[in-house]
Amino acid sequence: MRLRTTLCGRSPYGMALGVAVLVSAALTLTPASPAQADPADARKAPERCSTDPNAHLGKVPAPEQFFGFPLGKGQPRVLTTEEIKKYVEAVGGASDRVVTGTVAHSVTGQDLPYAIVSNSHNMVPGQLKKIADQIRSLRDPRSLRADKAARIADDSPAIVWIAGNVHGGEKSGADAALKTLYELASGLSCDVAKRNDNLVTVIVPTQNPDGRDASRRQNEYGFDLNRDWFARTQPETDGKIEMLRQYPPQVFVDAHEMGGRQYFFPPNADPIHHEIADQPVNWINRIGAANAAGFGYNGACGGAVTTECYFNYATYDLFYMGYGDSVPAAGFGAAGMTFEKGSSSAVEDRVQQQFNTQWATTGWAADNRREVLNGYYSIWRTALAEGAAGTLEPNEVVQPTNTVRFPVPGITIRSYFLLPDRQLGDVRRLVERLRRMDVEVYRVKKPVKVPSARVFGGRTASDVTVPEGAYWIPMDQPQKHWIQAVMGEDPYVPFPYFYDVSSWSNPLLSGVNTISTGDVLSPKADLVRDIDGGVASAAPRGGSYSYPMDSAAASELTFRLLGAGVPLTRDDRTGVVSLPATATNRGELDKLARSLGVTVEGAAAPASGAALHTPDVGLFAGTGVSTTSGSYGEARYVLGDRWGLGLTPVTTADINGNTPAFTERTVLLVPDGSSANGGLTAQGLANLRQWVSAGGTYVGLRNEGTRVARSAGLTSTTEKAKPTGYQVIGSHFRVDVAQGSPVSLGRPAEDFQFNNGDPILNPSQTGVNVLTYPSDDTFWSNGYTVGAEALKGTASLVDEPTGAGHAVLFAYNPLFRAYNENGIHLLANALLYPAGGAAPQAKQRIASARPETESLRSAAATAEEPPNLGGEWRPIVIQVADADLARAQAVVERYTDTALTASADGSSYITIPNPDGLSADEHPFVRDLVRDLGAAGIPLRSVVA
């Protein structure tokens, strides 16, 4: 069990905090031009601080005068995005302790402002860069001796980040961050001086200005930015992580809101990812004690104390590598922390409590600066030693009542190899994702034999020859923890509580050929310094350029070229795309292809194959589909932003009325949603069926996408009921790929598919089952699954011809978080489906059995479907022993009367419908329910939310 020093003792500054931070001083605003420190100040002795906690610099604008009201106590409303931006600029212009700028731009182009605060000496030109350089140097003990690291720990300030409002509707953290900014920028007290002398504090008040303006959790594309951290698909996330690389934190605060009137700060709930080092977990727990001491209000929740109080150990885990706490922890070695304030409290209390925890956190970091920096250096020394030995960190738990249920297996991993035999564009994009988190990746120059290899997908092999051009990722490097956290074939969850997915293995998401090994190897290899790809050889006039469209990267290149008016053809056997050599400028082609990691070859032969055409895509925005989140927004981003396709919204009324908005499209994409028929009338369903028969391409995703097709008589697939106890928590599965279908063109015979409790489809009898789960001993999955054998022999992707058109049905969401590259490639194939290009086996089946086809599809349309209990996410499922069922039901009934109960193999499962598809941190009562079950002494065998 990890060290826990959570709620014992008080912080050394706790008593002063209660006085200093809750009083707002009335100050006079003095107009000032942007301040700049005198370089000579670097040689001056520090100025004496004041014992008056209310003493501030008059030239720095106080919130009372800038906004007309204080921040925190007495605050009548939350700030606007524009007010935040202007206040950051005003403070930066008035204080020589502050540097301001823009960390990124949102989807709509809004600034994400930042402020960096420390004492004026640290803001002298060149000094801030020197500090950042020194902190970065601690992350590589190979080039920094221990004695030099100790001197840095003695002399350098630590870096603390305070970031708010990653969920747009959760606004109080941003306002509190401005209060923290004001105190640090203008305060003259010793409490402030301590922080500024010992810390460089990076403040990003709002990470999601578009969402803040719309009072919406997601950004403009409907992405939850607190799930985007490893993939960095959204501009808000990408710019922030680049700045984290420049100013790597030792402490990172991510300020949120939740339901109710309580406050959460760590210690976290289990599970915690095993590769998060011991030091950050120790710091997190000790900061929790400091926050408890400085919280004020009603103190700890418990007994009669139920509001304006704090709690720990509930809901907010540290496992999935897409959070704003887990990525700073695993990727940067920081005490990454989520703080959550109940949104039902008054504005003044929400902001004040957020400020109190920010202030307590910075106080702890200042008091423990030297220890933290010494520990920070040790994190990377340990990582190097573990990487050289091939040792993985063990699983541990932090909640006192929990024990490790699933230990990390005793395997040795010294290297990963990404093989170049297929999906090379996605291989290279993965290389770039790793490099942009400071992972060292090498390109193999000479074949190397690996005596003992673990092949992704649960297999082993002996004497594997890794070819020239493969990419080698040795674990003997400082970023060992991050490499394992995102590359590992399995995350090895220690405890079966799940608030997000249980697999995000990047090689599996890409479907690229990957091996790991514990062998000691020294391949001849060069460090990758830039992305590979581009035009490898020139084509003569009259010749052509070509590339295999076998990856999401190559798919993007294809759509970008089509959008630029370049004529493209594709070989329907190999999937190779070609274009005339004279169709585009070679330099421009090279630049575009290289940016995507795609190699383009020149040849003397002319372009060949069937012509590709830009699809005219209608995006269904009808009944049951959320247009502000989920796969609808993911389609807008991937198809619209990355591929440059125009997307026409198509409503339920458009299909029912057969309007041009629907009938003039060549493709209709129906995202996931909560309706079984999209609100379509009998006439609307007939219109849809006729549109497909006339040559349209219907693409349906997950629940709503497959069910609308079934209602319209476009498929013979039916849904298989999930057995009692069935759990698939965002896991990867091996799937067999039907070769010869245009939808599978470019994919290997075996692939991997991500399943997040998706509907189980019985195979089609009237089309091609493009992806199926093996029914034999090749069936394999990772992550956390229970009863997954129910998937054996079922379909994950179906291609159903109807007349001149077809329906492509994904049982899963191939656009999930825009990081499921193999699914994105399959979707691209579906959109580019050639006219009359049904797979030969499908054509034969339709021709020989047309009456039977209609009968089978009609029967499927009227078959009873299992209820969709989880919307676009999943239902809440709580597993208890049969003997504890009655007590658990009594607690659940305090919250809902919709729960369903079933038993199997000595366990009872309480399933709570979640029709709106809310995640655990959005849900109105799941957090309190789990806590009440624990308080009632009911052992929980698993929790899935």
Image (spheres, grey):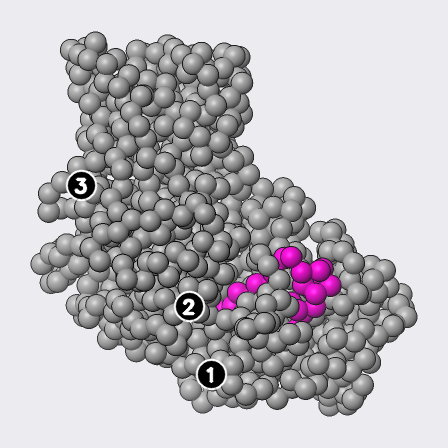
Q: Which residue is mark 3?
A: 792
Q: Quadrant of residue 275?
A: bottom left
The three-letter code of the residue at mark 3 reads: Lys
Q: Earlier in the sequence, mark 2 or mark 1?
A: 1
Between marks 2 and 3 in the image, the one whose residue lies nearer the viewer: 2
Q: Secondary structure at mark 1?
A: loop
Q: Is residue 420 left or right of residue 500?
A: left
Q: Are marks 2 and 1 in contact (CB under 8 Å)?
A: no
Label 1 neighbourhood size at 10 Å, few (<14), some (14-19), many (20+)?
Answer: some
Tell me where residue 124 sits by quadrant: bottom right
Residue 512, horizontal then vertical, whole percent: 27, 47
Name the residue at 34% across, 11% down. Answer: 693
Q: Secondary structure at mark 3?
A: loop
Residue 936 badge: 2
Q: Which residue is mark 1?
A: 5
Q: Is residue 178 visible?
A: no
As helix, strand or loop, the secondary structure at mark 2 comes to loop
Residue 784 disc label:
none
Magenta residues, start to end: 336-356
Viewer-nearest of labels 2 and 1?
2
Marks 3/1 in contact by CB < 8 Å: the verdict is: no
Q: Name the residue type under label 1.
A: Thr
- Asked whether 590 or 219 is in front, the reply is 219
Tell me the CA gap for discs 3 and 1.
47 Å
Label 3 Cα neighbours within 10 Å, binned few <14 / some 14-19 / many ≥20: some
Q: Residue at the location (32% across, 12% down)?
A: 804
Question: At 54% from the left edge and 88% from the top edge, which residue is drawn?
Answer: 9
Is 417 left or right of 357, judged from the image as shown? left
Quadrant assignment for the N terminus? bottom left
Separation of disc 2 and disc 1 at Cα?
25 Å
Q: Amino acid at mark 2?
A: Ala
Residue 915 screen position, x and y as percent: 45, 41
